[in-house]
Image (cartoon, helix red, strand yellow):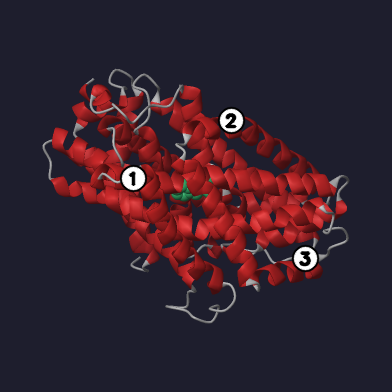
Amino acid sequence: IAGSTRSTAGRGLWSSRWVFFLAATGSAVGLGNIWKFPYITGQNGGGAFVLVYLACILAIGIPLLMAEFMIGRRGRANPEGAIAAVAREAGASRHWRRIGSMAVLTGFLILSFYAVIAGWTLAYAPAAFSGSFAGLDGKSSGALFDALLADPWQLAGYGSLVLAVTLGIVALGVRDGLERALRFMMPGLFLILLVMVGYAATTGYFMQAVEFLFAPDFSKLTGQGVLMALGHAFFTLSLASGAMMAYGSYLPAGTSIVRTSLMVALADTAVALLAGLAIFPLVFANGLEPGAGPGLIFVTLPIAFGQMPLGALVGGLFFVMLALAALTSTISLIEPAIAWLGERFGMGRVKAVLLSGAAVWLLSIGSVLSFNAWSEVTLLGKTFFDGLDFLTSNLMMPLGGLFTVLFTGWVMQRALAAQALGLEQSGGFGLWWLAIRWITPLAIALMFLHSLGLF
Ligand code: PFF
Ligand code: NA
């Protein structure tokens, strides 16, 4: 009870559990599902990668999502402040709060390249509506995408627009506008994806795609691939980057964290799998390369929109919906930093938005240039964009997640965790506790060591 009444003054809460569910789902569902999941699945050979990814969602992602909501709600502060408060309550060292500051930094770094990719979808929306995808084939579609990447001004322009809209919404205070947008956007995106899966089923390559996605061939999976599957489970559920902990800090005391976490994970996974089913039939039907990389959906989908009935409308709506889905994620990526600047340094909301906005914008230019002027500038074989993506998804998030479950399972102790989660009496608690204390830390550690080639 102490946790739910302490220091909520001035922070505000979600107006209902439904809004909280929408906001958390809005954060989870985004480019990770529709842009990243298909392309990294393609790069890692399909089925076996998907299986490991699904196992990571179930055994690691969902327990950790519950832990993050719980810590946020108990601590009622930005990620760093929330962990500090819970650590104090548990009589533990103040240093655990560094997990929170690292999470804030992770979200900030992700935003810098996420906004650039969201910009691609913005660039594609008008092109789709105007019917300019008509008659595209694999080659001409690839050329169209290459032309976009080659133009730093366009990339920077659209990326900056995404950042400006994100920061504007966050500066105004998030919740009302977000709620209204989410109510129609989530069902809309789902519906359009269903239409596209339906279209993909007419290409004659649907079963080939199903097989690619769901028939595991473990000879195609490398240690790096396993780590990528783990990292993507974190990325897609917005874990270890402050977002879910920050959203949990606005969560009313009575809401079921277990049910919400399960629903968020289910919605997120459903969207990713639908995206895979919509895209891979097109990849095979048009003789494209599954491992083509970050451009995969931007090369394949326009071909389909150029052929299907009402394709200009469907395609335009799709890219608008995707941009909105990305926007509800970018908002959650910057909110932890804003709350952190406000609560830790007493900075006003507008000032915090301007400061973090300027910094993230500068960083985003690095990602923009990595697709053109700096495409040859690499560190350990990675461009600026690749490097940031790898650093956040494959290092910072798994490490942050590891420390978060260690903190929850071994520092908070059973009684406090059960009380904070609100699950004391039910049998579900035992399962979650087992996952948090043993399964998740061991699995993350083993996958790390495996990716380093240690066994
Ligand atoms: N989960 C988002 C997606 O799948 O697109 C990306 C993301 C949002 C990652 C917020 C991390 C985060 F804090
Ligand atoms: Na996601």
**Residue 241 x/y as whole percent:** 38, 49
- The image's mark for residue 321 is none
* Residue annotated with mark 2: 180
Q: What element carries label 1?
A: helix
Task: Name the kind of residue labelled 3 in the image.
Answer: Ser
Which residue shows up at 44% across the image and 36% down it? 173
User: Could you say where residue 159 lies in the image, as x and y percent from the top left?
Assistant: 57, 59
Farthest bottom residue in view? 376
Q: Which amino acid does label 2 sit on?
A: Arg
Residue 141's mark? 3
Rounded to the nearest angstrom, the CA distance separating label 3 from label 2 is 35 Å
Give the amino acid type for the residue marked by disc 1 in the picture.
Thr
How far separated are the C-alphas under marks 3 and 1?
42 Å
Quarter of the image containing the N terminus?
Answer: top left
Q: Name the residue under label 1.
A: 440
Q: Are marks 3 and 2 in contact (CB under 8 Å)?
A: no
Q: In this picture, is 9 found above or below 384?
A: above
Most foreground residue, 149 or 37: 149
| Camera-nearest label, 3 or 2 | 2
Q: Residue drawn 37% across and 60% down?
A: 395
